[in-house]
Image (tube, coloured by chain):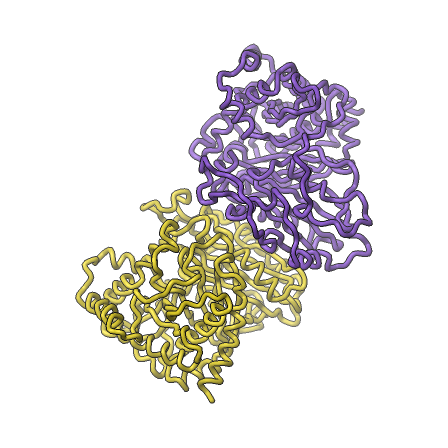
Chain colours: A yellow, B purple
Amino acid sequence: MFLYGESREQMMHVAGLMPFTPAPDSSPDQLRELMNELRMGATVHPPWNLKLRTPDLLWNPLQAWVEEPAVDLEYHVRRSALPSPGDERELGILVSRLHGHHVDFHRPPWEMHLIEGLERGRFAWYVKIHHSLIDGYTAMQTLTSALSHDPDERDRPLFFSIPQRSRAPAPVEPSEPGEAAATTGTRGINYPELLAAVREQYGASKTVVRALGNVVQSSRAGDHELISPLEAPRCVFNARISKSRRFATQRLPIDRLRAIAKAAGGTLNDVVLALSAGSLRTYLLEQQALPAAPLVAMLPVAIRAKDELGGGNAVGAILATLATDTGDPAERLARIIASTTRAKQQLQGMSKAAILQYSALLTAPSMLQMIPSTAGHLRPTFNVVISNVPGPEQPLYFRGARLEASYPMSIPVHGQALNITCSSYAGMMCFGFTGCRDTVPHLQRLAVYCGEALSDLEHAVLQ
Amino acid sequence: MFLYGESREQMMHVAGLMPFTPAPDSSPDQLRELMNELRMGATVHPPWNLKLRTPDLLWNPLQAWVEEPAVDLEYHVRRSALPSPGDERELGILVSRLHGHHVDFHRPPWEMHLIEGLERGRFAWYVKIHHSLIDGYTAMQTLTSALSHDPDERDRPLFFSIPQRSRAPAPVEPSEPGEAAATTGTRGINYPELLAAVREQYGASKTVVRALGNVVQSSRAGDHELISPLEAPRCVFNARISKSRRFATQRLPIDRLRAIAKAAGGTLNDVVLALSAGSLRTYLLEQQALPAAPLVAMLPVAIRAKDELGGGNAVGAILATLATDTGDPAERLARIIASTTRAKQQLQGMSKAAILQYSALLTAPSMLQMIPSTAGHLRPTFNVVISNVPGPEQPLYFRGARLEASYPMSIPVHGQALNITCSSYAGMMCFGFTGCRDTVPHLQRLAVYCGEALSDLEHAVLQ
């Protein structure tokens, strides 16, 4: 699926932007010395040494991963520097530009950029990975698990030189009040898995048919809590995209988000949706492009399925309203909570296979949007993808340098020009807004408005 | 032609790398201030505001250039910085990487990168232009003509804000001894013009048939001075290319080259060929890949045609031996001079149309190499393209910063993984070696060996 979608404008890679504060005693040439160390030779473990068997024929049905015997590390690991003054703006410009370049399928499809010249002697990593090699959730896990909890560990190798354990199932987050058995948004949606499930058992099971029937009926009956694929309004984000990207970040204390969630009887993820919704409303109003009907978000979700009580997770998708038609932040959050609660109830009691089928049927029309000729013509199934990838809770270090934040960069596609993905790290929620440069002008304002939405929500809910 | 050739691996853009030494009194933030000035608004004159009418269908027979009403200058003009220590190696790595990225055909297909962080407070421009918008010769002319001869002129706009005069015919260089009426290598070969000429008058004229007949006959008769398209040996450079580039530069005093040319009875361009040949021989010997037969170079040439005595130039192509089978630099130069002299004599007395036809027929088989499926399978018509673009003779300045050199970066294609283009500037010959990263490993050695070839040649010819 991710190879099929690749084109001159659509690039199916995800990335992480990770700024670091060096240790006080570290060499100013830390990155240069790291590069020299790599030039002396380093081991590259799977999957980082895997490349496509037929890179010139991406859609080959016999496509497969093969080992590259001589990984050219000087190609994959690159040094960069920010022009003065090395502030957040210059960093945003550089990583937007890096995110707009294709990976080379004649090599293992990943790149690591070591960026120096950030203000106050700081540096950053930008790590790009094609989604066909590894999904966003696993990517984030792999990157952070290669860091150390110990600031004094100074000889840690880079992530690609650390052998991978066999793919561990996604860890289940502790349940929150009001979250029932479903945890929302724990990994990027796995389209190939969805499609395979649909292909295998196309005659959708009775459970799925009943669930889909419920969704469509409730929509017709004026039930605005359960969102159907027929409800998303047309919106400027649901257009064809160009080759260039914009990226902006925001970082908010999780404690403040949790306090709101608790007061409103929702989950942390509901608050993430409400902050995104508040930001989108302000942005679209300013662009004079706010649809009259509320925006619909698609959320990848991890569900503990009825038939897998042992801890196995299914990955599916739900649709939720963003209630962008109201100016009242408290009402907006309440409607979001009602909407996600109903959607998750819908998934309760389904088997893993049924959840996959259901999610595929729910989001299938949006996949057609990835085909250039239909993008922007079909009515969108949803307006924006919002993902929440849980990250490490403790501070992490690379050779004494402290990881400041971990921002996910995702994939705009034709028909979905904006993606909001956030990741928790050491008490902060790190938001990454990834958009098409032309379809989402002034994208950095979304990050600013997201911060303002937190104050607004606190004011409305906690007073 | 240049749109047809564009693919994920083949990118039909040329570029110039121009390092500058800032004025002693200039602001350390000169480039940042320049960028702010552009953000305030700048006029963009043709051709820099032209984009393709159907960017998603590059081969559209109705393809045309249309004006972009709102050029996004923040997209086209970009700041970059070198990581420490900001030496030639880091500059080479950065521009190689920039040269390996596609232009965006949804916008005017050019980019200007302002690179800071070079050693001793210096900076550089890297300007990338798609060959479909403007040819390499005109590009170099436009870039340098937008600079000033006056170091005290501090308010000069950038090249795209200066209205272009109507395309002036290429200035004719003063003839050198032994050069007769043909000047070699004054601009990039204009394939579309060649192809159009062939298409218009496909029944090649008697002159052309006779000339081609001479070439092939002389080859069969053991005349090794006139090189035919049947003589080039197989060589590692004539292979499929990947997406990534390597770039290296060399700068040599023109006076030293002229002294050799004079002593050997050849032209400046013959010495450029001899230096390239010496470098290629050393490089290929080291790679244990030197063909037994001498390499053949293709040279774009500007010719004063018989029917255009008034100064009009025709652009054609000739083939020349590089005599890489001999270890004697003096003998190598002598054979090169004999070969280019015979090839130019061949063109003498032809009309402009005949020269175009002749050149097209001579190089036509090589165009087939640009089609991926044939690349590396056909026997090459020539092994390497070597161009010599005359540049300005006087020192040039941008707002007080002195242009140090002007290095051309050209286009490797399938079947031609290495390109050598040089340009004169202020008494120096500036060589740019552009190659495919994978097909031409250690490309920077070619630049080093080119410098060594000059000493060898002086030793052999001037003693």
Q: Is residue B316 left or right of residue A146?
A: right
Residue found farthest to the bottom:
A463
- In this orientation, which residue lies closer to the viewer: A315 or A318? A318
**As displayed, is residue A131 above or below residue B51?**
below
Q: Position of residue B72 (x, y in %)?
A: 58, 54
**As displayed, is residue B249 above or below residue A185?**
above
Q: Position of residue B335 (x, y in %)?
A: 67, 19
**As displayed, is residue B19 above or below residue A35?**
above
**As displayed, is residue B312 above or below residue B27?**
above
Q: Position of residue B425 (x, y in %)?
A: 74, 37
Residue found farthest to the left:
A206
Q: Is residue B32 left or right of residue B258?
A: left
Q: Quadrant of residue B67?
A: top right
Asked if residue A40 can be seen in this view, the reply is no
Q: Is residue A73 left or right of residue A350?
A: right
Q: Residue at x 27, y 57 (%)?
A: A196
Q: Residue at x 44, y 85 (%)?
A: A461
- In this orientation, which residue lies closer to the viewer: B418 or B364? B364
Q: Position of residue A172 (x, y in %)?
A: 36, 74
Q: Quadrant of residue B175?
A: top right
